[in-house]
Amino acid sequence: MKIIAFALTFLITPLFGEDEAIKPKVGSTFGKVMVVEVQFVEKENTYYQQNIVDEPWLAKVISINGTKLKEPVVIEYQIRDEKEKKYAKLQIYEFLAYESILSLGTPDKWTEEVQQIPYMIQQRLVMQEMTRKIRERLEKHK
């Protein structure tokens, strides 16, 4: 009887009170470097995307490391080492990227002050445009 109760505990526990897990939207793990093809698309007309998301668009990932995705993934992004380059919406660009998370805001009851931005976790793709120098570096590490 103890064995059955013990086994049932492992079967039922995931149904109740399991902690939420943050899983990558794009890659297999957070921080894994990959080459992505991206199109920039309009943000949704939500308060969060129009007022909290800093970038003018969202990134629509259409391929990873040369493999086209069955379903494109739309995600927030940050471009590193950008030299004020203007990107066109819906044009395809190639970036070296990794997926990361960032926490925003402060949890309720952490301070006595009213929080304007609720605590949240933001998933984003950190990207830098592919250059000849980056391509050469990647070739050396194959």
Image (spheres, rainbow, N blue to C red):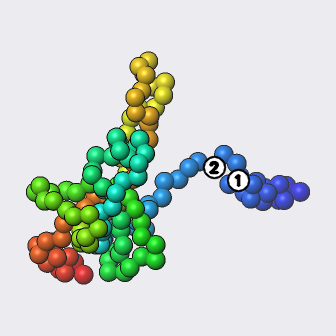
Name the spot of residue 118 as percent of width and height, x first.
Answer: 44, 34
> 122 and 28: which one is in front?
122
Asked if 1 appears above or below 34 in the picture, the reply is: above
Name the spot of residue 79 as percent of width and height, x first.
Answer: 22, 57
Any mark on residue 18, and which? 2
Q: Residues within 10 Å of mark 1 (few under 14, many from 20)?
A: few
Which residue bears the numbered disc 1?
15
Q: Does residue 36 show up?
A: yes
Q: Of the residues shown, which amino acid type is indicated by label 1?
A: Leu
Q: Quadrant of the C terminus?
A: bottom left
Asked if 14 appears above or below 140 in the picture, the reply is: above
User: Which element is circle 2 on?
Assistant: loop
Q: Does residue 33 show up?
A: no
- At 17% from the left and 80% from the top, the residue drawn is 140
- At 41% from the left and 19% from the top, the residue drawn is 113
Asked if 15 appears above or below 90 in the picture, the reply is: above
- Residue 91 lies in quadrant: bottom left
- Quote the CA–CA distance across marks 2 and 1: 7 Å
- Residue 99 lies in quadrant: bottom left
User: Which element is circle 1 on?
Assistant: helix
Name the spot of residue 89 as percent of width and height, x first.
Answer: 26, 63
Q: Of the residues shown, which amino acid type is indicated by label 2?
A: Glu
